[in-house]
Image: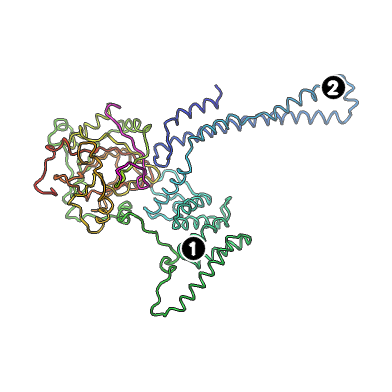
Amino acid sequence: MKPWLQLVFFTCVLFWLTEAEFFTSIGQMTDLIYAEKDLVQSLKEYIRAEENKLSQIKSWAEKMDALTSKSTSDPEGYLAHPVNAYKLVKRLNTDWLELENLVLQDTTHGFIANLTFQRQFFPTEEDETGAAKALMRLQDTYKLDPETLSRGNLPGAKYRSTLTVGDCFGMGKTAYNDGDYYHTVLWMEQALKQHDEGEETAVSKVEILDYLSYAVFQFGDLHRAMELTRRLISLDSTHERAGSNLRYFEKLLEKEREEKEREKPVNRTRTTTEAVVQSGAYERPLDYLPERDIYEALCRGEGVKMTPRRQKRLFCRYHDGNRNPHLLIAPFKEEDEWDSPHIVRYYDVMSDEEIEKIKQLAKPRLARATVRDPKTGVLTVASYRVSKSSWLEEDDDPVVAKVNQRMQQITGLTVKTAELLQVANYGMGGQYEPHFDFSRRPFDSTLKSEGNRLATFLNYKDEPDAFKRLGTGNRVATFLNYMSDVEAGGATVFPDFGAAIWPKKGTAVFWYNLFRSGEGDYRTRHAACPVLVGCKWVSNKWFHERGNEFLRPCGRTEVD
């Protein structure tokens, strides 16, 4: 079999189960690394074939150069020898035709065929856009300036990588096309800065200034927009749009001056420009998430710190599952992460071998994680949940049944009515913004209306009972296994009371989503922070109400 055919066959086997949206799963993006390596090998084969062809042509040229130098010095004397006369005729009739065929020989076929085949599995425009937005999400959440990201100065990073002027320009264009002028300004400024520093690039300053000046104008900063537009025109005086924009900006500025003059100094209010521009910086626009600032602060490790008095309530202990026979000899190490609501961490829940097996089973089945639309109840993808997940049954492998049984022994809850084991892998900037694991019910009397709770109520008050069709009740508890360490980011945070729990491979955290009365505990609204550096794998089991009525009986009050 030809090398390029072997390569195509290998690539086919590698990718046949792969779906789009590579950016949503680092685990699946690793396949792209091997695909690119294969393409490099294929390219090197093509280069070797081209070099071999050129070597033969060069050898022929040198040989003919020596021969013609000799024959042209004395043509008649040279042809006086009958062998020379014969060879001249033969060369011109046969040998030069063979050389022509050699020159016309197509050595690109193998490489082009392989590239064409693999291209159908390449990341799409959606992937590139998603990857760019992921970098912007990391930039916002962890308060990273474009310079830090561009230079690759990230905590815990094993490999350092930088962004070129073209990369920064691409980031800015992605933001611009999305109507996100805040990030457009940041990344176009970074592209311009690196360009001014002399970095070689195919992107012109005119292109950068064109986007930057308009984005700045969208923030109402007329003075700076005019300054940037004038700089653009100084580089390209024939730029029609820039000339038209400059005249428009000048008219707006003149109108603004006239309005200022008509206003009395005492009653003068700030202009749009003054409202959004402070010391040359532009404010990040507000979005749909009411607890955005708290959530991102927790992700950065800047959350609420427990008082010493509350910290004294946290303990470490050996946990035997209320004297479960399976755990009496080998109890699990249990550590309190938070006192109320009670969140605990268990150590050495899964071995490295079990984790690798679970990942191996899950990886081919990974699909973009979905969320349930609060109004329609339909599962759909969402920008606030960036990961891929799969569901494993006990029949898939004995290790799944073993892990399920272990979670049952630890929690004292039955897995018979629990959901399948969900395995999730987070992608670039992978996250799951604040959400509840349990189904919100309109009649839930524990829902308050102060502060952020009001926003929660407005968002979810019309949500149907998401688990009604299962017939197993609501999600009473969550058991979350961390199957990897994460170099930076990726914490599980609870914005309502300020807990931040960091991933530790082989450990698991557990909490109840419902009070004993069956009412939802709205304090358990939680989030998976964006992964800054690393590859985050988790698996979780959601226990339901049915079957646990006597294992976790009702309390005496609604909030026990």
Q: In the picture provided, is 331 more to the left or to the right than 74? A: left
Q: Which mark is residue 552?
A: none
Residue name at image x 41 percent, y 68 percent: 275
Q: CA distance from mark 2 to mark 1?
A: 80 Å
Report which quarter residue 74 is drawn in.
top right
Q: Is residue 491 magenta?
A: no
Residue name at image x 31 percent, y 37 percent: 483
Q: Which residue is mark 2?
A: 84
Q: In the picture provided, is 186 more to the left or to the right than 446? A: right
Horizontal and vertical percent for residue 129?
46, 46
Q: Which residues are magenta?
A: 376-396
* 50 vs 437: above or below: above
Q: Is residue 384 magenta?
A: yes
Q: Which mark is residue 217?
A: 1
Horizontal and vertical percent for residue 236?
62, 60
Indicate the secondary structure of the residue bearing disc 2. Answer: helix
* 373 vs 195: above or below: above
Could you tell me the amino acid type at mark 1?
Phe
Between discs 2 and 1, the one toward the N terminus: 2
Structural crowding at the residue carrying mark 2, measured as other residues with C-alpha within 10 Å and reported as few (<14), some (14–19) or many (≥20) = few
Could you tell me the amino acid type at mark 2?
Asn
Horizontal and vertical percent for residue 228?
54, 63
Indicate the secondary structure of the residue bearing disc 1. Answer: helix
Looking at the image, is mark 2 or mark 1 nearer the viewer?
1
